Amino acid sequence: GSILAVAGGGSASVNLWDTSTWEIVATLSIPRVDGPKPSDKSGSKKFVLSVAWSPDGKRIACGSMDGTISVFDVQRAKFLHHLEGHFMPVRSLVYSPYDPRLLFSASDDGNVHMYDAEGKALIGTMSGHASWVLCVDVSPDGAAIATGSSDRTVRLWDLNMRASVQTMSNHTDQVWGVAFRPPGGNDVRSGRLA
């Protein structure tokens, strides 16, 4: 599509830009969760760190410094609900390419959470990194995720087992981004991970 979601900083919102005109078409404001959290140092505002579109384009999720995830209905530009479970910053979010309800989050608490983003339910937690989980991506077939961490490792997780099946420890510094190669093509490199 031609709509770009931009989140970041203490604005407590996600701006939607029409890339053909470069005008803001909507601002999705994040309401504060009832009751202050000890880790929320921004007063009444949310400091947004991450944003993700659902594969069907109907929802946007954004992760905040206080560990909450906010879910929005894009067409109505309406806040739907918060997803909770993390108590430290949510650095990265990604929806499953096959199930628009399934959302994965990476957090400084060292955990990766799997949510039913529509049913507001935490489905599972995957742990194994020794420090902050900085990034997450889902494989094109939806069967695995990859995570990068400040512990200088990349982990590959089997979603059926909900367990780490491979750890790549050849980095010498924090891993801030992981990305599976998009689907398509028949060459041997189709299963690559950057």
Image (spheres, rainbow, N blue to C red):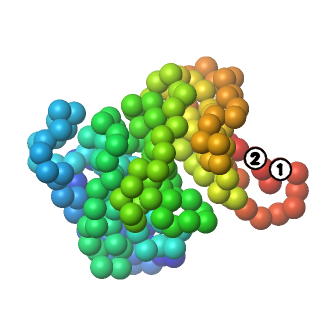
The x, y position of residue 138, in whole percent, is: 60, 52
What is the secondary structure assignment of the residue under circle 2?
loop
The amino acid type, in three-letter code, at marker 1 is Arg
Q: Please tell me how many numbered marks the rendered image carries.
A: 2
| Residue 150, visible in the rendered structure | yes
What is the secondary structure assignment of the residue under circle 1?
helix
Q: Is residue 3 left or right of residue 169?
A: left
- Binning the other alpha carbons within 10 Å of mark 2 as few (below 14), some (14 to 19) or many (20 upward) gives few
Q: In the displayed structure, would residue 126 be above or below residue 69?
A: above
Q: In the displayed structure, would residue 87 be above or below residue 27?
A: above
Give the camera-side residue of 85 and 137.
85
The amino acid type, in three-letter code, at marker 2 is Arg
| Residue 61, visible in the rendered structure | no
Specify the label residue 192 is tagged with.
2
Gap in angstroms between the C-alphas marked 2 and 1: 6 Å
Give the camera-side residue of 99 and 13.
99
Residue that carries the numbered disc 1 in the rendered image: 189
Query: Is there CB contact under 8 Å for labels 2 and 1?
Result: yes
Residue appearing at x 78%, y 50% in the figure: 191
Residue appearing at x 39%, y 31% in the figure: 109
Residue appearing at x 54%, y 44% in the figure: 136
Q: In the displayed structure, would residue 39 be above or below residue 32?
A: above
Residue appearing at x 68%, y 28% in the figure: 168
The x, y position of residue 141, in whole percent, is: 70, 59
Asked where in the image residue 73 lies, by quadrant, the reply is bottom left
The x, y position of residue 83, in whole percent, is: 33, 53
Q: In this view, does 186 lie to the left or right of 112?
A: right
